[in-house]
Image (tube, rainbow, N blue to C red):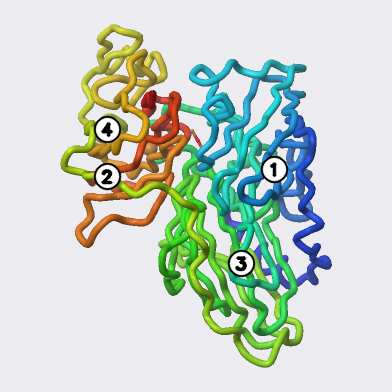
Amino acid sequence: MIRTDRRRFHRAALGLSAAASLPAAALAAAPTTLTARVGRARLAPAGHPDTGIWGFDGQVPGPVLRVTRGHRVSCRFVNELPQASSIHWHGVRIDNAMDGVVGLTQAAVEPGAFFDIDFIAPDAGTYWYHSHHRTWEQMARGLYGALVVAEPEGAPEADRDEPLLIDDWRLAGDAQIATGFGSLRDASHAGRIGNWITVNGDAGWSRDVGRFTRMRLRIVNTANARIFTLGVRGLEGWVVALDGMPLETPEVLDTLVLAPAQRADVIVDVVADAGDEAMLTSLERDGGYVLCGFPVRGRARGARRPPPGPLPANGVPDLGDLATARHAELRMEGGAMGRLSGAMLGGRMHDRGALAAAGKVWAFNGKAGMDEMPLLEARRGETVRITIINDTAWPHAMHLHGHHFRQVSAKGGPGPLRDTLLMDRGETASIAFVADNPGKWLLHCHMLEHAAAGMMTWLRVA
Ligand code: C2O
Ligand code: CU
């Protein structure tokens, strides 16, 4: 019922006048505590009840945290949920002790307990924070928020700066979050695909703008598993950063594919006429729908601003010689229509049935889920290359903690810096990075049901 209502609802909602927008600074205060707790959100259209969620400070998304590059993020994470939890700072080249990975870098924060967070934000750009314990359930319930790290200087000017966190909820008919988290059926297919899309926790999110307003949109895919193909109408501009990291040359914005956890910073000018509406859309096989709207009221200036230059670089070290780089191979197997007949789990060989009984349907190099041994051990400062072979019938969004990498297998030279790589079914890709951040770092699929069902390994940098 909710799914078929979606498009109509968007259209109706966008006809409403938007609340006055807050200037970016009003969202700015980095809180001294972040409390994970049960809350309620107005996700579904009028006529449906509020949805019970789990959120940071009881809201979804959690508060937008803003700091300037090189500054400290310090706050106390308080867990008031009925379940243990943790916070991971996605894409931040962080101190390993602050990475938030339960079972690898810290213990779970039990209900009623807290964990003190303190790290330096090393890179400017768009990052985000989310739970990293029972992630497939806790993110599906709403435990995420944006971390915006401002450039100390040299950022292109924009009239507005808007984090846009796109989520895909699975709601039941009563507008409550459907249970069945981490079901094997979802896990062995495309993950938990939902039926209700929101931007910043709102299915009809909109902001009034003027003609020729320039905006920096910080788009984050916070869905458990859905891949979005984004388009714009009445907006023209450039992609200036991916996964937080500036592109050396801004690229003209066309359609943009964002896998779970990926981000894009785009700088756009409103080119729709006054009285019209500019919008961000999701393009799907059946035509697509509006994600969020920008009703154009009057004009902001007489003409478009000149194109922006690139964002200042963040100082990620250059790759060393790939021919002599430390190399590992990672073969992904399993899932529906896959060939996995068995895999190691907890040090023992399991056949397909025994794996499924243990909730595992995927394997990396013949091992389902985390192993005691890392995929690879690197010396600090070494260049590492990992060849990832997607020997499955599904796309996957491979995420490395603590580092940004470049795809190096593509013809035409290394790709942009990323922390999450979307790999198509059957695709092989090589990624490379300088292992300059000591600690234990996860490498996993960010389709959270896939990770839970076996697509998870780790590296050690010493
Ligand atoms: Cu977004 Cu393992 O994380
Ligand atoms: Cu996957």
Query: Residue 375 vs residue 301: left or right?
Result: left
User: In this view of the protein, which residue sits in the foreground, 299 or 53?
Assistant: 299
Q: Are marks 1 and 4 in contact (CB under 8 Å)?
A: no
Q: Earlier in the sequence, mark 3 or mark 2?
A: 3
Q: Earlier in the sequence, mark 1 or mark 2?
A: 1
Q: How many badges with numbers are in the image? A: 4
Residue at 67% of width from left, 31% of height from top?
118
Q: Earlier in the sequence, mark 3 or mark 4?
A: 3
Residue at 58% of width from left, 41% of height from top?
170
Residue at label 3?
216
Residue at label 1?
175
Mark 3: which secondary structure?
Answer: strand
Most extreme residue toward the top is 348
Residue at label 2?
320
Q: Amino acid at mark 4?
A: Met
Mark 4: which secondary structure?
Answer: strand
Determine the CA span between mark 1 and mark 2: 52 Å
Q: Which mark is in front, 4 or 2? A: 2
Q: Quadrant of ligand 2?
A: top left
Determine the CA span between mark 4 and mark 2: 26 Å
Q: Which mark is in front, 1 or 4? A: 4
Q: Amino acid at mark 3?
A: Arg
